[in-house]
């Protein structure tokens, strides 16, 4: 009965939550990241440490409070919010929304909560991917800077002496 899934990552260095994945209906509003004040940050951190999923049918008040922390309203449909925490430090949450007339049963909630571990690993992988992209960008900028200082356009330019006195060094 899942109509949508939204996966958020908490980013402590920026004190915000960022949407990592959002599988929703085309009519939904776009949302990428949301800055958090200290109260909302602490509320989310505390909830994630407790490692307890929240279902609208069981605790709509708590779910509404957590969703307001990330700038989202409580949906009309049933929702399950699953805390995500990995051994590598990634933290976040997954929100599963049921279809219009559907409700998550206790069995559904249990099955979806089990997805917390693999989704936490996905958060780690996403963080590593972003880190690698940043490192690549920095390396390319450094390469451009060094080439500019050497007055060269490409790394493959011919080096004077590579076929004679520098041949042993170049091999």
Image (cartoon, grey):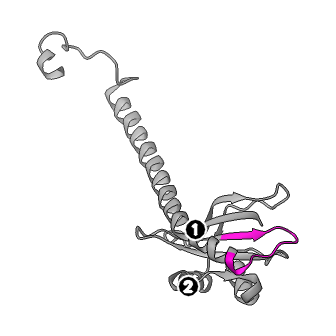
Can you give x and y, in whole percent of width and height, for residue 96 in the image? Answer: 70, 69
Whether residue 40 is situated above or below residue 118 in the rendered picture: below
Residue at x-position 66% and y-position 69% = 34
Q: Is residue 9 left or right of residue 22?
A: left
Can you give x and y, in whole percent of width and height, for residue 69 in the image? Answer: 67, 80
Can you give x and y, in whole percent of width and height, for residue 90 in the image? Answer: 48, 68
- Quarter of image, res 150: top left
Residue at x-position 68% and y-position 70% = 95
Instruction: Quarter of the image for the N terminus: give it.
Output: bottom right
Residue at x-position 25% and y-position 17% = 159
- Quarter of image, res 58: bottom right
Residues 119 and 31: in front is 119
Residues 84 and 105: in front is 105
| Tag 1 and tag 2, C-beta contact below 8 Å | no
Q: Secondary structure at mark 2?
A: helix
Q: Along the polypeptide, which appears first: circle 1 or circle 2?
A: 2
Q: Is residue 132 left or right of residue 24?
A: left
Which is closer to the viewer, label 1 or label 2? 1
Instruction: Quarter of the image for the C terminus: give it.
Output: top left
Residue with the most extreme front position: 107
Residue identifier under label 2:
42
Q: Which residues are magenta?
A: 95-107
Residue with the most extreme right position: 101
Residue identifier under label 1:
115
- Quarter of image, res 23: bottom right
Q: Secondary structure at mark 1?
A: loop
Q: Is residue 6 shown to the viewer in this render?
A: yes
Q: CA–CA distance between discs 1 and 2?
A: 24 Å
Can you give x and y, in whole percent of width and height, for residue 111 in the image? Answer: 63, 72
Q: Is residue 15 magenta?
A: no
């Amino acid at each position: 009965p899942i109509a949508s899934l939204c996966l958020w990552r908490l980013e402590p260095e920026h004190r915000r939550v960022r949407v990592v994945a959002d599988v929703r209906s085309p009519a939904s509003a776009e949302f990428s990241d949301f800055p958090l004040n200290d109260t909302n940050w602490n509320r989310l951190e505390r909830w994630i440490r407790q490692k307890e999923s929240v279902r609208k049918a069981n605790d709509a008040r708590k779910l509404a409070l957590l969703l307001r922390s990330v700038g989202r309203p409580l949906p009309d449909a049933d929702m399950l919010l699953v805390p995500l925490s990995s051994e590598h430090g990634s933290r976040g949450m997954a929100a599963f929304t049921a279809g219009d007339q559907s409700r998550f049963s206790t069995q559904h909630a249990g099955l979806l909560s089990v997805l917390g571990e693999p989704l936490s690993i996905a958060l780690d992988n996403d963080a590593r991917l972003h880190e690698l992209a940043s490192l690549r960008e920095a390396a390319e900028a450094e390469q451009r800077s060094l080439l500019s200082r050497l007055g060269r356009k490409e790394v493959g330019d011919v080096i004077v002496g590579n076929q004679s006195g520098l041949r042993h060094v170049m091999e």
